[in-house]
Amino acid sequence: MKNLVILGAGTSGTMMANHLVSNLPKKEWKITVIDQYKTHYYQPGFLFLPFDIYTTKQVKKNGKKFIPKGVNYIQEKIELIIPKENKVKLEKGNTLDYDILIVATGTKIAPDETEGMNGPEWYKSIFDFYTYEGAKALRNKLREWEGGKLVVHITEMPIKCPVAPLEFAFLADSFFKHKGMRDKVDITFVTPLDGAFTKPKATEALHYLLEEKGIKEVTDFNIERIDYENNKIIDYADAVVDYDLLVTVPTNMGDALIERSGMGDDLNYIPTNKTTLQSKDYENIFAIGDATNLPASKAGSVAHFEAEILTENILRFIKGEALAEEFDGHANCFIETGGGKALLIDFNYTHEPVEGTFPFPGVGPLKLLKESRMNHMGKMAFRWIYWNMLIKGIHIPFVSATMSEKGKHFDKVN
Amino acid sequence: MKKIIANREIDVNEDGYLVDFTQWDREISVCLAGECEIVMTERHWEVIEYIHDKHQKEEPLSIRGIKKSGVINIKEFYALFPGGPLKKATLIAGIPKPKSCI
């Protein structure tokens, strides 16, 4: 009996368990998933929780429900990966051997990386919305906040779901309009990049949204520290932005386990082959989702496309065949723009988001890089798709793992 | 597109970044630095060397990486290449603009 061990039961790990249980011969392979946490969060919902659009119940479920039968599920903290011995050590001292290891330990916020962030004002006037706790604390704050300077801020790239901070700014604009207090709130978007969108062509096409919503923009801002006593963020070039309420996306880092095991880069991400998803250092270790150092978005859609390709590659690896260099960095993201509308973008390593129709070329019904109510419905429907299809590893019809160039206007936005 | 730098025809992209590193030499750097109103010193060259090294190893450049480089601290990096130091330093080094845009 051989062992395939998956570290992490988040979006990627759960998907891989579901894919592999139906693809690996049960008599030959034992599949084990290890994760210390009981709750599986619908992380895209953390964007909506602060605005009371989603309830806390809508964004969390018991993770065990999604681990398929026939998979050994261990709920314990992982102490160490020992790649040279093909072993994983657990907190209570047990050791597991593996023939194949899949690392799906994700990414976490690291507010300690910025001076003054994780201090006395954390969850008082400084918040994140990338954790359940942060999003919930921010919801409680926004319910009673009387207005002032709201600063939405990105500390450094890469971050999970790169468009989420901008969506937050758009939804904040809608939220305060509905509360009849938009005139009391000044919204500023602060980013280390040179534009609000993370892709240059999208920035060009969508800049009007910021103007339309009266959101100010501060670009090329690399934060050095937060002066929490005087409510200021300060960058390395001594630029200063004042805030009353700071909603920041702290530095994102891979799990501390990766650092402890000596397997990560500067940010604890696993150096991974960007087309095959095999780790660069060990041929029987694969990485998926936010845990990798791939130059792709850290997003559930990316993990979903990766999972389909990684499953094929695991099967090839077992047969001793060459791995397919197939993953193209495909990402597909809805971007909430407020007021019940959303955008949809579809892109990969080499193609920036462009205008067009999705998923049916020339038909849609979803429009790429254009605001519409239909796209918003798509985003809202996605929560159901996530819980019922995506993490169960069910293929989403008409959406292929690699990006389709059909129905897209590549020359139009060039 | 082509651009005349140091009396030579050099291939650059729309932002003025070199597209073919084999066309780069120190003279090109000095001219590009001049356009950014930067006068190259020994410290500048040390940073350019570090950037070339990272580029060769295909390791992404970042402000965090600079912090850990052991070559220079971030304050000095900003002082040497005022404005957007990563963007300017890579332009002068003749390599593509860093892609943190993902």
Image (cartoon, coloured by chain):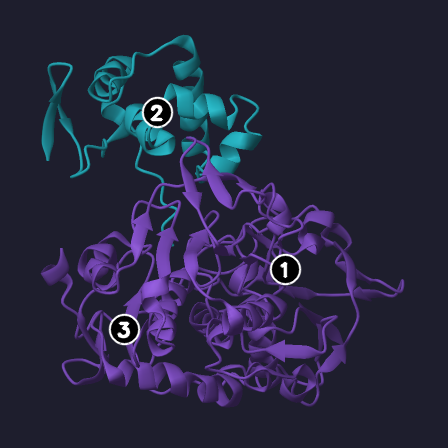
Chain colours: A purple, B cyan
Assign a secondary structure to mark 2.
loop
Residue A346 against residue A386 in the figure, above or below: above
The amino acid type of the residue labelled 3 equals Leu
Q: Is residue A388 left or right of residue B82?
A: right
Near-viewer residue (B50 or A366): A366
> What chain does mark 1 sit on?
A
Q: Amino acid at mark 1?
A: Asn
The numbered disc on residue A343 is 3
Query: What chain does badge 3 belong to?
Result: A
Q: Which mark is residue B82?
A: 2
Tell me the quadrant of the picture where the C terminus of chain A can be found.
bottom left
- In the rendered image, residues at marks 2 and 3 fall on the same chain: no
Q: CA separation, marks 3 and 1? A: 39 Å
Disc 1 to disc 2, how far (Cα)? 46 Å
Coordinates of residue A333 in the picture (x, y in percent): 36, 71
Residue A337, x across and y down, in percent:
30, 71
Q: Position of residue A329 (x, y in %)?
A: 38, 61
Q: Which residue is mark 1?
A: A284
- Seen in the picture, residue A220 relative to A15 is either above or below; the reply is above
Q: Disc 1 or disc 2, which is closer to the eye?
A: 2
